[in-house]
Amino acid sequence: MTISRRQFLTGAAAIAAGLPSPVGAATEAKWGTRIVPSTGLRIPAVGLGTWITFNIGRDPELLERSTDVMRAFFEEGGGMIDSSPMYGSSQTTVGHGLKRLGHPKTLFAAEKVWTDADGEGRSQIATTQQKWGVPAFDLLQVHNLVAADAHLETLFAMREEGALAHVGVTTSHGRRHRDLEKLMVRWPLDFVQLTYNVVDREAERRLLPLAREKGIAVIANRPFRRGSLIDQTRSSPLPNWAGEISADVWSSILLKFVLSHPAITVAIPATTNPGHMRENKAAARGVMPAPDLREKISAYIRAL
Amino acid sequence: MIDAVLGYSPSDFLLFSESVYWRLFARANAATWPAAAITPIAAMALLAATGRSGMRRAVGLSFATAWAGVSLFFIPLYREINWAIAHLAPGFWLEAVLLLIWALASRTPERPGPVRQGIGWTIGLTATLGWPLLSFAPDRSIAAAQVVGLAPDPTALATLAAALLFARGVWTPLLAAAPFAWCMISAATLLTMGAWEGWLLIIGAVLALVGLASGRQKLRTPPT
């Protein structure tokens, strides 16, 4: 019986997930990394989202601020930066920052295809690549499942050509979960991206278990519900149990909840504040809440 | 794509933050200074010349310039953060052309009826002098004051006022159509952002409709 390289790596990753990391133990502890099941690649568990926050046009002051956020991101280990053609000028902002920072090697470039024209995928990707100033992407995803089958054909062809490392699909706000589930069954996806946070837990029912079963990495978007969870908790003192997970700010509790689900590979909070970026990165390190504490966190925040 | 679009709520179409939006006006004002300090007063002076002989051409040419100014100095900035504006940008140029044609079309002076004049003055004052003062509100910046000829919202409102005060016959609704549409679109954006200025736009646009429906203008024979 022969097995494919991906099958071997998926199995090895599953085994490795249960064993202490050999050479990378210090790296994992320092940066809080997770394994991508399909390829065995290790990436930081907290990435950087760019929805809204990086859509700033050519405003020089805001471009500088976004570069500062990216600088903090890379100083804390880097990893996945996620954007999309739908996000206005965010792609250009990312490209500006990468150029200013000298294209750090720890970048995991994640982008999306967002067009309902089946044949426009490659040209849109080429445009996106120019904006980032990168030779290729680590992950390309079909944004919000628009023309999913057609674009997945293209993306898997690109992966076969060696022009792309990972293929994925995205949804958000709990939309189209049934369609997403069908795609996860039908296609050998490397990643899915969906909304998952302390109050939006719908994905726990079917999608997250399915992702674990099929060895699909999961990206959690809207971990703070576009800031509303931060606003909701801002004026509340930290509960005593926050110390059990070494969380000294609410954002850390919110992120640790997300990251403590065994199916989650990466969370991609967005921010315009370099200090908050460092806090987000710190949440991937140290103790994660056990199942009973996860339920306590969720109930506590729902009650606020 | 249509299925995907229908599944969204209004806030999902808001691609930018409120703070970034307000900064656009500061950038436009800085790039065209001292125009931002001059245009509100000039626009108010024009509207104040209601009924005076020969003023319609001056009003038409000036407001055509105002819409061109918005197209040249603000719309490109807005397009940086809102790709949907690309579809609306031609409407700004169309309005400028309409105003230009109207300015050159006829020389007959006219004076609006009292209701239309009252509404036109109210909207005109709000747009020219009142709107820039909104920048004194908390969480706003004086540098980002929105003025006629650079910012689309006061330009649209001031044009509604000009249409009520100076236009007659079919020209009134023709010149008011694009400004009215913009007031509704911008109001939707502002209210989605949680900015109360959106309500002012809606009120202004509805008042303009009342003014349009208030009856025919009374003509005054020019002096011999």
Image: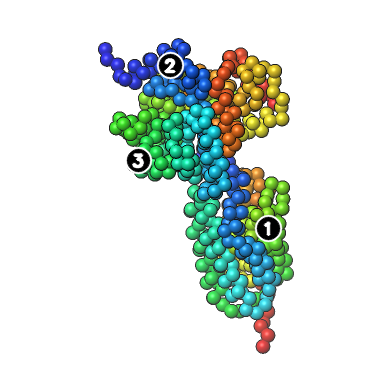
- B209 versus B112 height, above or below: above
Residue B6 lies, in percent from the top left, at 50, 40
Circle 2: is it few (<14), some (14-19), or many (20+) Cα within 10 Å?
few
* Mark 3 or mark 2, whichever is nearer to me: 2
Q: Classify residue A188 as left or right of residue B83.
A: left
Q: Quadrant of residue B213?
A: bottom right
Q: Chain of mark 3?
A: A
Residue A18 spot, x, y in % from top left: 46, 12
Residue located 62% across and 50% down the image? B22
| Circle 1 residue | B132
Q: Is residue B17 left or right of residue A182?
A: right
For label 3, the crowd category at 10 Å Cα-Cα, with few meaning under 14, some 14 to 19 and many 20 or more, is some
Q: Vertically, is A217 above or below A82?
A: above
The residue lying at 40 percent from left, 31 percent from top is A138
Which amino acid type is shown beneath numbered disc 2? Answer: Val
Q: Secondary structure at mark 2?
A: loop
> Considering the image in quadrants, where does the C terminus of chain A appear?
top right
Q: Are discs 3 and 1 both within one chain?
A: no
Q: According to the image, label 2 marks what residue? A: A23
Chain letter for mark 1:
B
The residue type indicated by label 1 comes to: Pro
The image position of residue B137, as x and y in percent, is 72, 50
The kind of residue on which mark 3 rests is Arg
> Which one is in front in this view, the residue at disc 1 or the one at disc 2?
2
Q: What numbered label is drawn on residue A122?
A: 3
